[in-house]
Amino acid sequence: MGGPSSLRVLTAAQRIAIVSVMMTHRIRWPFVAAIALLTGLGASPAHVVAQAPANAPATQDGQAPQPKLPPRAKPQKPNDPAGPQVTPEIRAELLDGLYSELAKAPDAARAEAITASIDRLWANSGSPTTDLLMQRAIAAFNAGQKPLAQRLLDSVVELQPDYAEAFNRRAFVYYGQQDFSRALGDLRRTLALEPRHFRALEGLAQILRNMGEKKAALDAYKELLKAHPHSPGASEALKELTREIEGQGI
């Protein structure tokens, strides 16, 4: 029970509960503390679902729908000693386990609980400064200040070029600015860092479909459904694209 290797014996419910306890109760690792809280408090996962990228195709006037950046967990203050401290190794093992459980989730309700915990881990950059910049970027975007949101996210990716969620969030901003080329670039960068990042896969599939790149969109939806079989609307989109492509004789 003393280190990351202990995560391999946990069930999906335990992983979800550990993430919920860690973030909600703001406890500090070591890992054994999370286990103690898990068994002692019987914590249940928080069902927090971040908004996915815009689902609708381009509107009648030719403009792509405007996405709304999903909320992030409240950032810890830069000098807050009570903030959760997640080592990269533990974070990676938790994510790996949760991704595996998501891929075989028996139903949408179970998948929702798992994605909520994954969202919590994605939101934890490991840096209070990065968390604060991300929060400000989201607030700026949702207030219509897209250039400011982009500048803030530019700073984040410079500070932490291996933080996948920063590229995913910046892709939303580029998408909102109708800059699809840069949005696709950031989504692909996200997936290079986190190949099972289902929200980036969803955004990639939707943008490619809106651009008329049907075969590429079809492939992206297939990857999305491997990572998240219960992704809302993905199965229907896959079927529609398959019919469209087959109808073209491709």
Image (cartoon, rainbow, N blue to C red):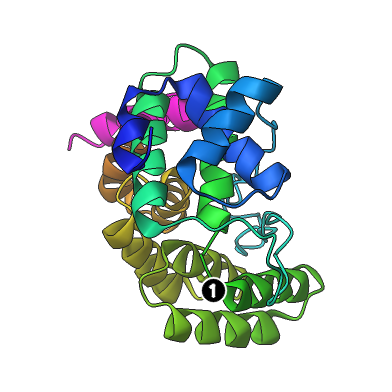
Residue 224 figure quarter: top left
Q: Residue at x 70, y 69 (%)?
A: 135
- Residue 9 as seen in the image, left or right of residue 28: left
Residue 87 figure quarter: bottom left
Seen from this angle, which residue lies furthest right?
143
Q: Nearer the viewer, residue 13 or 56?
A: 13
Is-magenta flag for residue 138?
no
Q: Nearer the viewer, residue 25 or 216?
A: 25
- Residue 224 as seen in the image, left or right of residue 58: left
- Residue 250 image position (x, y, % from top left): 17, 38
The residue that mark 1 highlights is: 174
- Residue 248 image position (x, y, % from top left): 25, 37
> Does residue 232 appear anywhere in the picture?
no
Seen from this angle, which residue lies furthest top?
106
- The amino acid sitting under disc 1 is Tyr
Q: Nearer the viewer, residue 193 or 4?
A: 4
Q: Residue at x 60, y 27 (%)?
A: 38
Q: Residue at x 53, y 71 (%)?
A: 170
- Residue 165 as seen in the image, left or right of residue 37: left
Is-magenta flag for residue 247?
yes
Q: Residue at x 61, y 51 (%)?
A: 54
Magenta stretch in the rendered image: 225-250
Q: Main secondary structure of the magenta part?
A: helix
- Residue 219 image position (x, y, % from top left): 26, 42
> Does residue 245 appear anywhere in the picture?
yes
Q: Nearer the viewer, residue 153 or 21?
A: 21
